[in-house]
Amino acid sequence: MKARAIAHPNIALVKYWGKRSDALNLPAVGSISITLDTLATDTRVHFDPGLEGDEFVLNGVSHAEQGRRVSRFLDLFRARAGVECRARIRSSNNFPTGAGLASSAAGFAALARAVDAALNLNMDRETLSIMARRGSGSAGRSLFGGFAEQRRGQFDDRDDDAGCHSLRAAEDWPLEVVVAITETAQKKTGSTQGMSRSADSSPYFGAWINAQPDDLELARTAIATQDFDRLAEVAEFSCLKMHGLAMGSRPPLLYWNVATVDCIHAVRAMRDDGWKVFFTVDAGPQVKVICAPGWCSRVAERLAGIAGVTDTRCCGLGRGAYVVV
Ligand code: DP6
């Protein structure tokens, strides 16, 4: 009834923003991501018959609100396993939590993997990705290493077709990523709230949904053919469109700070100089710079010199969530 699992954050190249069902946490659009190495969530789960309620401790601190979200997530597994037993969960991140670094993706992927092992459910990776997605829409992708796709699915009242699959292994195309940290405080408006606001109020929401299949197809082809320039183009396009959608919400969502914008300009200047790089930004002010193999350290050095960049982290592509014995 005990297990430990590790998962890495993933960074979307074709973004997920918007839901078509809150109850099943079904995405309004499919998405494509890369799973990182280096940054990690390490989660231990212990189902203990002596517990009266679930206990959730993140980075040494108990969280009531996140604890309730985790408890509802555990209920999905308890229902499958036919058990009532409550669990003690200890989780830690080696990177800032809730600051646009996909901590919820790594968190729910690690939790799904650990709970599956603790309850001896033996679900396959794709089924686990469906479970992880119920916790956080981007979490299913962290079940897979390298390049992964979250499928939109067709139904609004069931989610068995809204799982993830691998597009390409990490070792096939070992891209590198520099994360430029420009702020470590938790963001004011989380993704869940932000995307619901965009769906309710952004005049661009319909256009965003309609164009996603084309972006996904472009990215799939670029990944299959290892075409860095094409991947760069569609990823930056998807990122800026998502932020345009967010900025066009009411009230507007502006996740960037001055350093975010300076990093974006710096990446464009690097590319003008022939460097193999592109940027992406999620629901926070950090900038993730994806580099062709071998470019990471000089890109990190350049970004570290930008005012407001407090830290840079270099990552490679990593593996999907795994159990540690
Ligand atoms: C901008 O997966 O955090 O990172 O499903 O509400 O938990 P919920 O949202 P979440 O949203 C991620 C949004 C994004 C883009 C992406 O990862 O695709």
Image (cartoon, rainbow, N blue to C red):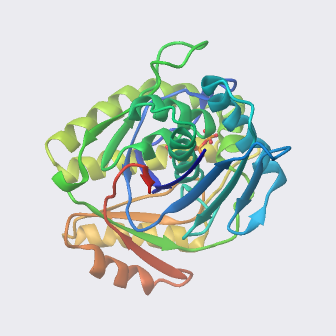
Q: Is residue 213 left or right of residue 115?
A: left
Is residue 3 shown above or below 62?
Answer: above
Picture coordinates of residue 202, whole percent (x, y): 65, 34
In depth, the one of 3 and 307 nearer the eye is 3
Locate the C terminus and report the quarter of the image it occupies: bottom left
Q: Residue at x 53, y 68 (%)?
A: 260
Q: Is residue 14 visible?
A: no
Tell me where residue 171 sits by quadrant. bottom left
Tag count? 0
Q: Is residue 7 left or right of residue 171?
A: right
Furthest residue in direction front, as rendered: 50
Q: Residue at x 72, y 37 (%)?
A: 197
* Ligand 1 rendered quadrant: top right
Picture coordinates of residue 222, whole percent (x, y): 21, 42
In depth, the one of 271 and 139 nearer the eye is 139
Q: Residue at x 46, y 20 (%)?
A: 153
Is residue 247 shown above or below 137?
Answer: below
In depth, the one of 259 and 224 nearer the eye is 224
Is residue 90 shown above or below 150?
Answer: below
Q: Is residue 212 visible?
A: yes
Picture coordinates of residue 201, whole percent (x, y): 71, 32
Q: Residue at x 44, y 47 (%)?
A: 142
